[in-house]
Amino acid sequence: MAELKLRSTSPALLRQIIESALAERLQSLETGLKRTQERLQEFEERYQLSTAEFIQRFNNDEFAHSFEFDEWVGESRMLRHLQEKKQAIEGVEFVN
């Protein structure tokens, strides 16, 4: 695990600021994840396919490109991106 060191004349205040910013970002990511998951569920219900199956078949050129399918692919990528960011924030540990 990588370690990041910060120096400050007010370390307790800096820690509080960073913890608060990370908590706010985590909340924002969770909101984005919820919206993205809801959007993916709409596609899955409309087309009666899981996103994983759709992506596999889309990548195998089983579907013609359409704006809606491009959106579905984009939402899938966004979900993965948001999950990675959330995991990164949740993995932050403050050490003294």
Image: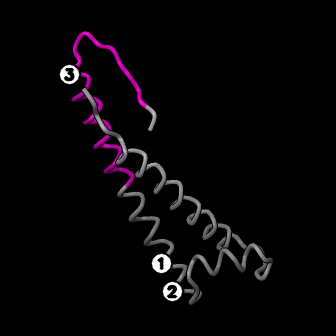
Q: Which residue is denoted by mark 3 in the rendering? A: 13
Q: Is residue 62 above or below residue 94?
A: below
Q: Residue at x 53, y 54 (%)?
A: 81
Lower sequence index among marks 1 and 3: 3
Residue type at the position of mark 1: Gln
Horizontal arrangement in the rendering, residue 64 relative to residue 1 (left or right): right
Q: Quadrant of the N terminus?
A: top left
Q: Which residue is denoted by mark 2 in the rendering? A: 45
Q: Is residue 31 above or below residue 44?
A: above
Toward the viewer: 67 or 17? Answer: 17
Prevailing secondary structure class for the magenta stretch in the rendered image: helix
Q: Position of residue 84 (x, y in %)?
A: 48, 52
Q: Residue at x 60, y 76 (%)?
A: 52
Looking at the rendered image, the disc whose residue lies closer to the viewer, 2 or 3, is 3
Asked which secondary structure carries label 2, the reply is helix
Mark sitting on residue 41: 1
Residue type at the position of mark 3: Leu
Segment tinted magenta in the rendering: 3-29
Q: Position of residue 25 (x, y in %)?
A: 35, 44
Lower sequence index among marks 2 and 3: 3
Asked which secondary structure carries label 1, the reply is helix
Q: Position of residue 83 (x, y in %)?
A: 46, 57
Check contact, mark 1 vs mark 3: CB within 8 A: no
